Image: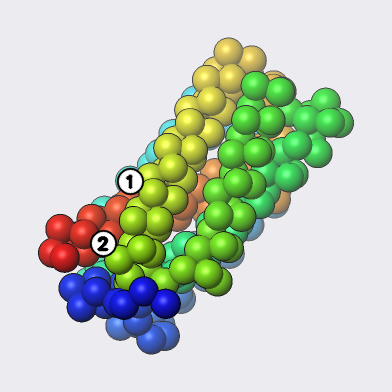
Amino acid sequence: MPPRDRESAGLVAPWPPPSAAPVLTALAIWLAAACLFGASGLLTTLRPPRPQLVLIGLTIALLAAGWLWPPLSRFAGAVDVRALVLFHVTRLVGFRFLALHARGELPWAFAVPAGWGDNVVAIGAVLLIFLVRPDTRRGRPLYLAWNILGLIDILVVVGTAAGLALAEPGSMQALVEFPLSLLLTFVVPIIIATHMVMLVRLRRAASTS
C-alpha cells in the first residue's frame, strides 16, 4: 500500500465523527418528512418548474446549513471521506431509470444517459471504498477525479430532467411519484452537497501536500 500523506490523514477518520448524533438525527427527520411528503402525492400536483425549485431550494438550504450550523460544519469537516462516498451507492437507482424507460415511463434522453452515468459513478464509489484509501498519494487523486466526474454527472442529470420536464411536463412524472420523489426531496441535495464537501477537502489536502 502506498504511504499515507501526513497532510491528508484527516481524510480518513474513526466513526463517529464530531457532532454525528445531531446531524444523523436531523437527517432521519428530513428523510421521514420527505417520505411523508412523497407518499401524500403533493409533489405530483406541482407543475414544472416547481418540483425543480424544491430541489434547488433544499440543496441551497443544506449547503447553507453546512456553513451556519456548527454541528453540521464539524461533521462535514471531520467525517471519513469514504463515508461520504458510500452515500453515492444510492445512485444505483440508475438501473431503475433504465427499467422505467423499457416500460415507456421515462424518455430515452433522460433514462439512458442518466441511468448508465449514475450506475458507473455508484460502481466507482464501491471500488474506491474497498480498494483505495483517500489519504495516500495515489488514492487522493483517484478520489478527486471520481468526485469531479460524479459532480458533473449529477449536474447534467438534474439539468436534463429539468429541461425535459419543462418541455414535456408529463414525460418526467415518474420522478415525482413516491418513492422516486425522494430523489428530489432528499437524495440529490445530499449528493450535490457531499460532492462539494469532498471537493473542498480533497483540494485542500492536495494543496498542503
Residue at 49% in and 38% down? 153
**Residue farthest to the top?**
167
Left or right: residue 94 versus residue 25 is right
Helix, strand, or loop for circle 1? Answer: helix
> Residue 22 appears at what percent x and percent y?
38, 78
Quarter of the image with the C terminus is: bottom left
Q: Which mark is residue 60?
A: 1
Residue at 65% in and 38% down? 116
Residue at 37% in and 68% down? 134
Quarter of the image with the N terminus is: bottom left
Q: According to the image, what is the colour scheme of the structure?
A: rainbow
Left or right: residue 63 versus residue 41 is left
> Residue 135 appears at what percent x and percent y?
32, 72
**Residue farthest to the right?**
103
Question: Which quadrant would residue 6 be assigned to in this image?
Answer: bottom left
> Residue 111 appears at what percent x and percent y?
68, 31
**Amino acid at pointer 2:** Arg
Question: Which quadrant would residue 127 be assigned to in this image?
Answer: bottom right
Which numbered disc, 1 or 2, marks the residue closer to the eye? 2
Up-down relation of residue 183 to residue 33 (above or below): above
Task: Identify which residue, 15 or 12, lies in the foreground.
Answer: 12
**Amino acid at pointer 1:** Ile
Up-down relation of residue 176 to residue 186 (above or below): above
